[in-house]
Amino acid sequence: MKRKRLLLRMIILLLLFTAIGFALYQNLFTGDSKEVIQVNKPVANFKLAQLNGEPIELKKLNGKAVLVNFWGSWCEPCKREMPSMQDAYNHYKKDEFEIVAVNVQESDIAVKSFVKSYGLSFPIVLDKEGEVYRSWEIFNLPTSVFIKPNGKIERTYEGEMSMKQLDQWIRDILPNKPQ
């Protein structure tokens, strides 16, 4: 009986050390292939369809300041920040600024209804399978990624943005920063 308990304890300990070793290996020795969202690093490209079916490819917006915002129609903070984003878009679009709002895994009907009820005029793209959401390692909605005209990430932010934050962070990435 003692031998069986000792053997069981050794097996449990071996499994525990194996799990710890694997976790350390994953964190210390694997490549940075998933670290897509890093400040001062080039942003990963994506190509997604808008509500009208027309595609938007992120790399084709190089030369512009871009805000990529991941959102859902069910998300309360997303709902609260959308009017501020629309105001910012109206104010800065003449300054080589673009918003690409990435809806994550919702139906066309839900997204169209949301866009109509909020009167949104900036591009809304559909990440139907959540591929961009996962590959960019986005964990919460809303999440915003501010991209400089050179295609490098200036800042990321999880959560609802205030108009003051939005205004400052957009000014930080504009090609010809207004004072």
Image (cartoon, helix red, strand yellow):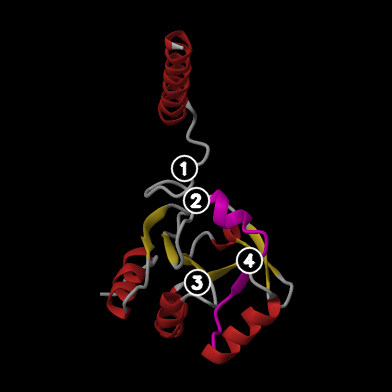
- Find out whether the residues at labels 4 and 2 contact each other: C-beta distance under 8 Å: no
- What residue do we see at 54% from left, 72% from top? 72
- Give me the disc on residue 137: 2
- Find out whether the residues at labels 4 and 3 contact each other: C-beta distance under 8 Å: no
Rendered image quadrant of residue 162: bottom left
Q: Secondary structure at mark 4?
A: loop
Is residue 24 or residue 115 the one in the foreground?
Answer: 24
Which of the marked residues, 4 or 3, is nearer the chain's N terminus?
A: 3
Select label 2 or label 3 by which is in front. Answer: 2
- The image shows residue 76 at horizontal and vertical percentages of 44, 78
Select label 1 or label 2 by which is in front. Answer: 2
- The image shows residue 175 at horizontal and vertical percentages of 39, 65
> Is residue 123 inside the magenta stretch?
yes
Which of the marked residues, 1 or 4, is nearer the chain's N terminus?
A: 1
| Magenta-tinted stretch | 119-136
Q: Sort mark 1 into few (<14), some (14-19) or many (20+) by Cα contacts within 10 Å.
A: few
Select label 1 or label 3 by which is in front. Answer: 1
Q: CA distance from mark 1 to mark 4?
A: 22 Å
- Give me the disc on residue 105: 4
Q: Amino acid at mark 3?
A: Glu
Which of the marked residues, 1 or 2, is nearer the chain's N terminus?
A: 1
Q: Secondary structure at mark 3?
A: strand
Residue for badge 3: 98
- The image shows residue 4 at horizontal and vertical percentages of 48, 12
Furthest residue to the front?
A: 1
- What residue do we see at 66% from left, 63% from top? 48
Select label 4 or label 3 by which is in front. Answer: 4
Q: Secondary structure at mark 2?
A: loop
Give above or below for 108 relative to 44.
below
Q: Amino acid at mark 4?
A: Gln
